[in-house]
Amino acid sequence: MELVIFSITALIAVIGAVAMLTSRNAVHSALFLLMNFGAIAVLYLLLQAPFLFAVQLIVYAGAIIVLFLFVVMLLGAERDEDETNPIRWQTPTALVMAILLIAEVVYVLISNPQTTVARVGNANVFAAPTDIARALFTTYLLPFEIASFVLLTALIGVVVLHQRRS
Amino acid sequence: MLPTIFYIGLSALLFVIGVCGVLMRRSALMVFMSVELMLNSANLALVTFANQWKSLDAQVMVFFVITIAAAEVAVGLALLVMIFMRKQTTNIDSMTTLKG
């Protein structure tokens, strides 16, 4: 059962990623990326991470994709991009490198001993949202504050970038 | 019980697709989306290992990665809009101002 869910979700994720890569229209690309993010969120649920499932859907699928779509439509960049690549050998080289990378990953995965992930719905859930909140506000309090500072910096940076020069 | 290798393999595949996107597409917007895809695949690997070792730390780290990614997207897209206003294009080959 778990294998079936994993297979379907993984298939959707890979199809979304490849379609994002190949579609000419930037709006379609963003929507395929949304499909991929949704599939990954389901995988988080399979991996017993309900908190990250929610965060993935809210932050990635909600905020980031909306931001992307907003910018695509603002720029009118959904038309076909100019595909004349001045570096002619770049695409074939990229494909060869990708195949090499895949081969390397397969080798590493095969040469290592097998381990398994825990079954979904185990009685002792180790990463309930309350546990994550406890870790976040005790052990990781300083990184948490720094993250809020980074977000504030990004906010101010964006406002400064788009100031009207007088 | 699924082997960890399934999740890590999927994560690696998504990462390689993201690398292909960065190398092959010419629009800065598409390059940016591919980078997001790579970030997500790395997150998937982290969550997988968190599950394998029953450790909370990796999940907290993924939470921080998502936070920083949100900030990075906001700043990156703002820069992209600025570049588009100047050059009327998002083609990365036209951004050669820093070329020596």
Image (tube, helix red, strand yellow):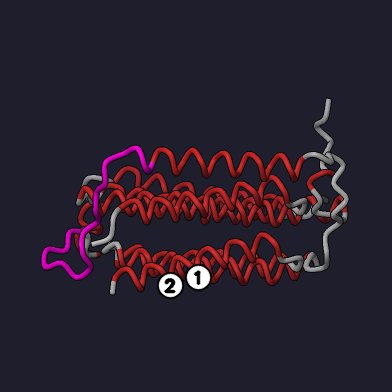
Residue at (28, 55) in percent of width and height = B3
Residue at (40, 55) in percent of width and height = B44
Residue that numbered label 1 is attached to: A12
Residue that numbered label 2 is attached to: A8
Report the disc number at residue A125.
Answer: none
Q: Choose top left, top right, bottom left or bottom right for residue A10.
A: bottom left
Label 1: which secondary element: helix
Whether residue A96 is in magenta: the answer is no
Residue at (55, 69) in percent of width and height = A34
Q: Quadrant of the N terminus of chain A?
A: bottom left
Magenta highlight range: A109-126
Whether residue A111 is in magenta: the answer is yes
Query: Residue A9, image x and y in percent?
Result: 43, 70
Q: Amino acid at mark 2?
A: Ile
Do callouts 2 and 1 mark residues in contact (Cβ within 8 Å)?
yes
Q: Amino acid at mark 1?
A: Ile
Pointers 2 and 1 within a single chain: yes
Which secondary structure type mostly characterizes the magenta part of the structure? Answer: loop
Query: Residue A137, image x and y in percent?
Result: 25, 52
